[in-house]
């Protein structure tokens, strides 16, 4: 079971820090309920601090950009929001030092809920601000919220819509790079989150010799595009080559690829 120590999130400043002493597990939660079904999972919370603490469980959505960065958005506003399908009980707890609690996460999938959805659960320390704390927050413009983030996803067990493509292979080598660097896009055209392995294959046009390079793994959400950087991690002799970016995303799907011609002088 995955476990995590606290992440302190300063969303107003856009940074993440580590620090407070409580524990939450799991930090990844996956449901596979079919339309019309109900599933239940649990969150375990432990207060490792030396004093009583109050905690709240809050729902949020997130979007994923082309670099794979998850950006929180308000609950119910995500393109594939899961918030309306989730209920957390209890949503507020108070724990003594070294005390633990189990919260229930109830997923209710409507009869038309065939698509993959995702969201976040924030487990936050709830603190009452003193007058001094409030004045300090107003002066700095930053409110520190100790929290652990749980990523939640739901894909119906009956959903076998796995489809993806790789495209737009191009060289992006910059001065000072030790090796030739390339960029390619992975596009998820299906309805499941995929873990794709993308690698380069270099074939010498004159000799027909071929060499493959280590893959890079990326996670791509439905409807999303990830930009992947790949390198030829060796010095390539002069010659004319066909360079291919090859993607394997499993689930009995055929390999996908795109290529370009490369002249090494």
Image (spheres, rainbow, N blue to C red):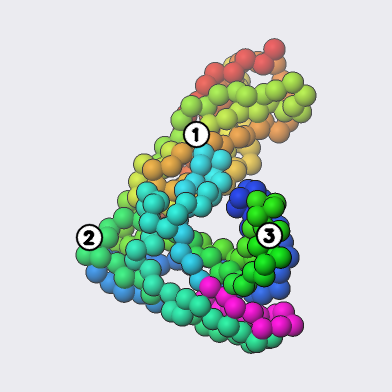
* Residue highlighted by disc 1: 185
From the viewer's side, name the closer residue of 230 and 242: 230
Q: Earlier in the sequence, mark 2 or mark 1?
A: 2
Residue 154: where, in percent of width, then height? 39, 62
Is 94 left or right of 253, judged from the image as shown? right
Quadrant in the picture for the C terminus: top right
The residue pinned by badge 2 equals 112
Q: Residues within 10 Å of mark 3 (few under 14, many from 20)?
A: few
Nearest to the observer: residue 182 or residue 265 = 182
List the residue tagged with mark 3: 135
Q: CA distance from mark 1 to mark 3?
A: 47 Å
Q: Nearer the viewer, mark 1 or mark 3?
A: 3
Q: Magenta part of the protein: which range? A: 43-56
- In this rendering, the answer to whether 26 lies above or below 162 is below
Q: Are marks 2 and 3 in contact (CB under 8 Å)?
A: no
Residue 53 lies in the magenta stretch: yes
Measure the C-alpha gap from mark 2 to mark 3: 49 Å
Q: Are marks 1 and 3 in contact (CB under 8 Å)?
A: no
């Amino acid at each position: 079971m995955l476990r995590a120590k606290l992440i302190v999130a300063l969303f107003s400043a856009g940074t993440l820090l580590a620090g407070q002493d409580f524990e939450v597990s799991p930090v990844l939660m996956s449901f596979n309920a079919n339309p019309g079904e109900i599933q239940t999972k649990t969150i375990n919370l432990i207060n490792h601090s030396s004093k009583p603490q109050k905690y709240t469980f809050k729902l949020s959505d997130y979007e994923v950009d082309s670099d794979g960065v998850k950006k929180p958005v308000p609950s119910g506003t995500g393109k594939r929001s899961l918030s309306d399908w989730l209920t957390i009980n209890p949503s507020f707890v108070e724990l003594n030092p070294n005390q633990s609690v189990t919260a229930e996460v109830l997923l209710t999938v409507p009869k038309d809920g065939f698509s993959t959805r995702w969201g976040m659960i924030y487990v936050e320390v709830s603190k009452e601000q003193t007058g001094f704390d409030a004045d300090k927050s107003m002066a700095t413009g930053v409110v520190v919220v100790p929290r652990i983030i749980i990523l939640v996803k739901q894909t119906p067990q009956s959903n076998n819509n796995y489809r993806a493509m790789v495209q737009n292979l191009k060289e992006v080598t910059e001065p000072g790079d030790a090796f030739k660097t390339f960029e390619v896009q992975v596009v998820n055209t299906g309805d499941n989150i995929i873990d794709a392995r993308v690698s380069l294959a270099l074939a010498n046009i004159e000799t027909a010799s071929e060499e493959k390079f280590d893959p890079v793994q990326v996670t791509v959400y439905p409807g999303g595009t990830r930009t992947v950087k790949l390198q030829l991690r060796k010095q390539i002799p002069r010659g004319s080559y066909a360079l291919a970016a090859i993607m394997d995303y499993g689930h009995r799907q055929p390999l996908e690829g795109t290529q370009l011609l490369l002249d090494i002088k």
